[in-house]
Image: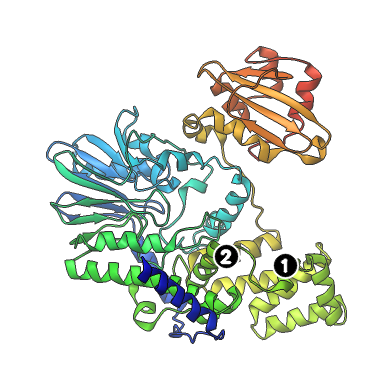
């Protein structure tokens, strides 16, 4: 204990005594031909079912994620079930050509929708064992997120959903697959909830096949990997795929524990698998090749983490860090570490924010000038808005696209209706997108360019009935708990109202206390509420989804209330719809 204390103290002393200095980049990645790179990547997603080894089949290219079938003596089980009923049915039809053995079980490697929403296509009656980590149900429930409107918009940009709608030449791919089915309004969700869960490890036998399930946090906290020891097959979920990992996602995510991700891969390496079968991109085989790939992948993750921390301790800001933290050549050139999906720069920023939050350490950033002040200041420096526009056009001409986009953003802030400013920014973003091999960046840049030009308007055109089977599995309490984030402050600033909710079909009750601009969620039915709303949970879900007219629901008696009708109307007016 004394030795450890001295070691920590010595380390802190050394760090404190260092003069901040920039880390020299380990290497500069040579820019490759974008078109050639994208052609190679598209081949990775060619729709096919691959026979990895005896009894293991990987369906690739049917959606962003893969589905994997493992065949035993009398039955089969499926690892990851696609993101919709439609794509899952296509995969199942292909698996049925291989074998007619019944499906005994499903395994979810993690909670992401593209891996879990097609379950009912494989087991239409829903009566099947579903293995997952014991937090997966919790994270699936978060799919009905209070941030859903903004996450849907950012996801549509990142995954190029609207580019795909404009025609096959508008979108190359989404980095890990051809397209994302969960953002398609015509796709149907068919979730079967996990019913066989574990915490750390589970050793079991399915269809006569020995199966080890191991909790391995990485891209998600509930991530697991599947190890088939008798076949030397490792199914790593989303902790490794043929692209630099998405250590931070630009659609917006919780902080992803980067070191935990590297350590999870260490657990996989220790098994010395012969076959690596990811849930995105194609498999590789050969014990040495698999081991080398796993090692390079975890080393890249740890390198970015450690060098970011080193720079943080030298006082570098995120903008400075991204200039100096570069992968060394042997990692930058590795085929599994090309920036098709994640990017080192985004990872560095995510790590900084995960450890220290938004403040970069410079007091000038504690209370920065607001966007209007910055835009006015930039225009003043340029000699007025016309001067600023000339500077933006000049940057565009010089192919300084990042700077042109930034200047055009200030112009739009000064005059949101300026068609010239919007076109300058659109031209800059499109040029940036066309230079990208990274699908997330490329799709985001080009989609936002089209939004500025008025070609694309991102809206939530989800068909509520397509999501009903999923929504019906979400605990009704979560719908009430989501209400506070939809409270309209301007209408509630002077209100004090206690409202109870009863759902007799599930024998549950909850409360919402409106208190001068704040809505407090209560996990049980409150005492002496001013207003009580009573409905079956299915009816309330349909109201939230917009499948029922609220006025008709109250008029028919499907939704009842006790208290003043005036209070009821007043209460409901305080909230914007939970689903926009």
> Relative to residue 42, is residue 254 depicted above or below?
above
Q: Can see residue 117?
A: no
x then y, percent, for residue 567: 79, 21
**Residue 552 relative to residue 148: left or right:** right
Residue 352 locus on image (x, y percent): 54, 68
Visible in this render: residue 471? yes
Which of the image's four quarters has the N terminus?
bottom left
What residue would you read off at disc 1?
366
- Element on which disc 2 rests: helix
Q: Disc 1 or 2, which lies upstream in sequence?
A: 2
**Residue at point 54% right, 43% down?**
185
Q: Are marks 1 and 2 in contact (CB under 8 Å)?
A: no
Tell which residue pokes out farthest to the front in this image: 2
Residues packed near mark 2 inside 10 Å, few (<14), some (14 to 19) or many (20 plus): few
Which colour scheme appears in the figure?
rainbow
Q: How many marks?
A: 2
The relative height of residue 160 versus residue 400 in the rendered view (above or below) is above
**483 in relation to 564, above or below:** below
Q: Quadrant of residue 365?
A: bottom right
Q: Residue at x 44, y 70 (%)?
A: 305
Q: Which residue is mark 2?
A: 356
Disc 1 element: loop
Near-viewer residue (67 or 348): 348
Q: Position of residue 464 (x, y in %)?
A: 56, 34
Choose between 322 and 106: the one closer to the eye.
Answer: 322
Quarter of the view holding residue 290: bottom left
């Amino acid at each position: 204990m004394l030795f450890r204390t001295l070691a920590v103290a010595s380390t802190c002393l050394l760090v404190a005594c260092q003069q901040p200095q920039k880390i020299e980049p380990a290497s500069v990645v040579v820019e490759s031909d974008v078109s050639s790179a994208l052609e190679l990547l598209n081949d990775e997603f060619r729709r096919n079912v691959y026979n990895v080894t005896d009894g293991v089949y990987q369906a690739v290219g049917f959606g962003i994620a893969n589905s994997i079938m493992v065949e035993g003596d009398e039955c089969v089980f499926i690892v990851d079930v696609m993101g919709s009923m439609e794509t899952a049915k296509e995969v199942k039809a292909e698996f049925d050509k291989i074998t007619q053995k019944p499906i005994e079980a499903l395994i979810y490697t993690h909670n992401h929708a593209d891996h879990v929403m097609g379950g009912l296509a494989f087991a239409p009656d829903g009566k099947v064992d579903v293995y997952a980590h014991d937090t997966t149900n919790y994270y699936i429930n978060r799919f009905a997120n209070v941030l859903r409107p903004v996450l849907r918009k950012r996801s549509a940009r990142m995954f190029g959903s609207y580019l795909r709608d404009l025609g096959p030449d508008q979108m190359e791919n989404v980095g890990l697959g051809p397209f994302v089915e969960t953002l398609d309004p015509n796709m149907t969700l068919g979730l079967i909830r996990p019913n066989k869960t574990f915490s750390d490890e589970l050793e079991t036998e399915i269809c006569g096949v020995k199966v080890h399930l191991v909790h391995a946090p990485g891209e998600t906290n509930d991530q697991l990997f599947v190890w088939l020891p008798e076949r030397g097959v490792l199914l790593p979920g989303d902790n490794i795929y043929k692209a630099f990992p998405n250590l931070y996602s630009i659609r917006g995510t919780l902080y992803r524990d980067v070191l935990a991700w590297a350590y999870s891969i260490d657990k996989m390496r220790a098994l010395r698998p012969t076959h690596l079968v990811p849930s995105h991109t194609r498999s590789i085989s050969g014990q040495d090749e698999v081991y080398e790939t796993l090692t390079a992948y975890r080393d890249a993750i740890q390198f970015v983490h450690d060098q970011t921390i080193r720079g943080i301790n030298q006082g570098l800001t995120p903008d400075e860090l991204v200039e100096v933290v570069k992968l060394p050549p042997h990692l930058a050139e590795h085929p599994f570490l090309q920036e098709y999906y994640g990017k080192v720069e985004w990872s560095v920023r995510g790590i900084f924010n995960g450890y220290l939050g938004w403040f970069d350490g410079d007091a000038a950033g504690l209370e920065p000038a607001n966007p209007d002040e910055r835009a006015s200041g930039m225009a003043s420096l340029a000699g007025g808005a016309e001067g600023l526009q000339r500077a933006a056009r000049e940057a565009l001409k010089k192919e300084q696209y990042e700077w042109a986009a930034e200047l055009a953003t200030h112009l739009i802030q000064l005059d949101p209706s300026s068609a010239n400013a919007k076109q300058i920014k659109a031209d800059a973003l499109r040029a940036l997108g066309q230079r990208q091999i990274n699908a997330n960046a490329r799709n985001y840049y080009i989609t936002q360019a089209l939004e500025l030009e008025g070609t694309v308007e991102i809206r939530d055109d989800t068909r509520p009935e397509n999501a009903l089977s999923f929504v019906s599995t979400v605990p009704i309490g979560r719908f009430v708990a989501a209400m506070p984030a939809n409270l309209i402050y301007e209408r509630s600033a002077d209100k004090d109202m206690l409202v109870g909710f009863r759902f007799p079909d599930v024998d549950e009750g909850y409360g919402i206390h409106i208190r001068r601009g704040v809505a407090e969620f209560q996990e049980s039915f409150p005492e002496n509420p001013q207003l009580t709303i009573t409905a079956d949970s299915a009816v309330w879900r349909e109201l939230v989804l917009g499948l029922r007219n609220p006025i008709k629901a109250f008029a028919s008696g499907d939704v009842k209330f006790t208290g003043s009708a005036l209070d009821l109307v007043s209460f409901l007016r305080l909230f914007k719809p939970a689903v926009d």
